[in-house]
């Protein structure tokens, strides 16, 4: 268990907190760890949400389903990523999304009320936690704006190129975590249409790719 907590010690939520205070922090926030296997349900839409989750290992997928069971992927949370904080901070007690394990993973949960409010022990790190939480939520808002930017494009090719621009960062060569089905869901399209467009883009010398490895030419 101690090794698990060491994995998340440098999460942005704990920036500026002394490592010597970390054990006390884990106890104060009522931390608990849970392991999941690939595709296992972590949180079902409509279930109560009162904890923040930090991905200690693996990846998790956040998506919404319509009445026909069609999935739209909102985002994927990588190792050391955090989820649940926006809903908890907004006072939403029932999750509007479903979360599943993209890979075998381990999640460390913290009681949101313990994170967002100074405790009776007047722990010095609580105000730092609250400041860090505000920064994380602001960054999540930027990520949401990125997706809105991608989906606002008129054609699938423009959406793909915009998505790739956000993925590539400092290099034209990059790897995406989505498989084709997940990428199509993220772009609100379907797999065959996305696969066909990727092939055309490669034929037109716009991109080159092999499985999940891409390059913008």
Image (cartoon, rainbow, N blue to C red):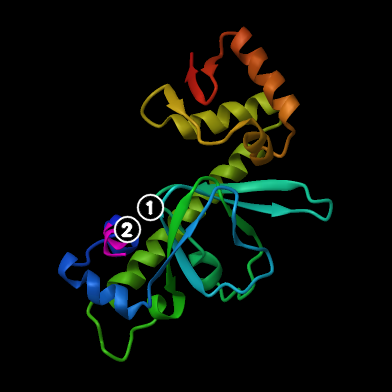
Q: CA distance from mark 1 to mark 2?
A: 6 Å
How crowded pointer 1 is (Cα within 10 Å; few <14, some 14-19, many 20+) is rated as many
Q: Quadrant of residue 138?
A: bottom left
Q: Quadrant of residue 139?
A: bottom left
- Vertical position of residue 201 compared to residue 73: above or below: above
Seen as rendered, the residue at the extreme bottom is 120
User: Which residue is the site of mark 2?
Assistant: 8
Q: Going by the image, does 115 lie left or right of 161?
A: left
* Residue 209 percent across, percent down from the top left: 53, 17
- Vertical position of residue 203 compared to residue 137: above or below: above
Indicate the quadrant containing the N terminus: top left, top right, bottom left or bottom right.
bottom left
Residue in the picture at 33% in, 69% down: 131
Q: Are marks 1 and 2 in contact (CB under 8 Å)?
A: yes
Closer to us: 13 or 99 = 99
Prevailing SS of the magenta stretch: helix
Q: Which mark is residue 188?
A: none
Q: Which mark is residue 80?
A: 1
Q: What are the residue bounds of the magenta stretch?
A: 1-6
Seen as rendered, the residue at the extreme left is 20
Residue in the picture at 38% in, 78% down: 30
Q: Going by the image, does 73 lie left or right of 2?
A: right
Residue in the picture at 55% in, 47% down: 38
- Vertical position of residue 43 compared to residue 150: above or below: below
| Local secondary structure at mark 1 | loop
Task: Evaluate whether residue 179 shows in this view.
Answer: yes
Between discs 1 and 2, the one toward the N terminus: 2
């Amino acid at each position: 268990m101690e090794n698990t907590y060491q994995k998340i010690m440098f999460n942005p939520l704990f920036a500026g907190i002394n490592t010597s205070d970390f054990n006390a922090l884990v106890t104060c926030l009522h931390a608990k760890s849970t392991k999941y296997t690939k595709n296992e349900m972590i949180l079902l839409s409509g279930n109560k949400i009162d904890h923040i989750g930090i991905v200690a290992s693996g990846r998790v997928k956040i998506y919404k389903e319509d009445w026909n069971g069609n999935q739209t992927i909102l985002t994927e949370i990588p190792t050391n990523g955090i989820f649940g904080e926006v809903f908890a901070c907004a006072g939403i007690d029932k999750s509007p999304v479903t979360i599943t394990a993209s890979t075998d993973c381990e999640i460390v949960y913290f009681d949101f009320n313990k994170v967002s409010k100074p405790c009776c022990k007047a722990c010095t790190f609580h105000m730092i936690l609250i400041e860090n939480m505000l920064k994380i939520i602001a960054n999540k808002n930027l990520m949401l704006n990125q997706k809105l930017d991608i989906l606002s494009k008129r054609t699938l090719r423009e959406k793909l190129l915009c998505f790739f621009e956000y993925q590539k960062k400092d290099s034209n060569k990059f790897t995406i975590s989505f498989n084709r089905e997940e990428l199509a869901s993220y772009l609100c399209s379907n797999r065959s249409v996305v696969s066909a467009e990727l092939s055309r883009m490669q034929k037109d010398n716009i991109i080159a790719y092999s499985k999940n490895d891409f390059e913008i030419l």
